[in-house]
Image: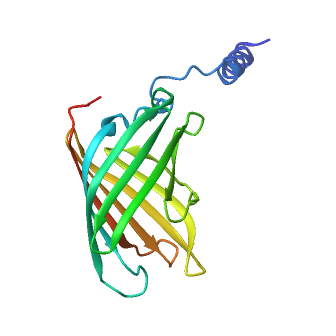
Amino acid sequence: MNTPNRWLAFLLLCTCAVVSAPHRASAEDQPAAAKDGQHDFDFEIGTWKTRLSRRLNPLTGSNKWVEYEGTTVVRKVWNGGANLVELDVKGPAGRIEGLSLRLYNPQTRQWSLNFSNRQGGTLSPPTIGEFKNGRGEFYAQETLGGRAILVRFVISEMKPDSCRFEQAFSDDGGKTWEVNWIATDTRLDNERP
């Protein structure tokens, strides 16, 4: 074999070796480790004073709101893999006794928030989501007045002694949202995570 053919064979052999060599991923190539959100709600364990504003007739063009005041008690279940929320507020429009069972799914790393009130006696479809950048966002599809709507539940402004909850509905596939529930909780006890 003459010298030019040897060089060509050598280059071809080197190219095949590089192409067939296993790729060693660098740290930059690796996806970021998914965050374990099992303890996302630990900040809320304890007893809270709740101030709640609720829109009376959502998605009707009405802007009439009613105010409530009372307490929220949050208990850890399954070492943080779930928690139970008891809401008890009163106002001019009556009383709301609510219960929320929040369940963490370690495979999807998301929470399902399952709400019921004493009057209805059944769980609503769960809102599902997660916490990112200090904000929890949870979504569901429900019906209101016989029509399909989207529900968005947001938890924000989380501090050791206060936090904010906001629910909004959309009847246009999420293009616009109408807020219908705003709650601000202030810690009543010294029970902190």
Give whichever of 71, 171 is nearer the camera: 71
Relative image position of residue 191 (x, y in whole percent) = 25, 31
Q: Examine the rendering and report whether any part of residue 35 can be seen.
A: no
Q: Can the viewer see residue 183?
A: yes
Q: Is residue 153 above or below residue 43?
A: below
Q: Residue furthest right?
A: 1
Position of residue 116 measured from the top left corner of the image (x, y, whole percent): 51, 57
Quarter occupied by residue 147 = bottom right
Residue at screen point 55% across, 81% down: 145
Please determine whether, in this image, residue 72 is positioned above or below residue 151: above
Q: How many marks?
A: 0
Quarter containing the N terminus: top right
The answer to whether 60 is drawn above or below residue 44 in the figure is: below
Horizontally, residue 54 falls left or right of residue 119, namely left
Q: Quadrant of the C terminus?
A: top left
Name the residue at 72% across, 14% down: 6
| Residue found farthest to the bottom | 61
Pick the residue in front: 3 or 75.
75
- Image position, residue 136 (x, y; %): 38, 49
Q: Residue at x 47, y 71 (%)?
A: 174
Task: Give how far across and how far down residue 33 sits, in percent.
Answer: 48, 29
Seen in the image, is 51 located left or right of residue 27? left
Of the pair 65 and 4, the residue shown nearer to us: 65
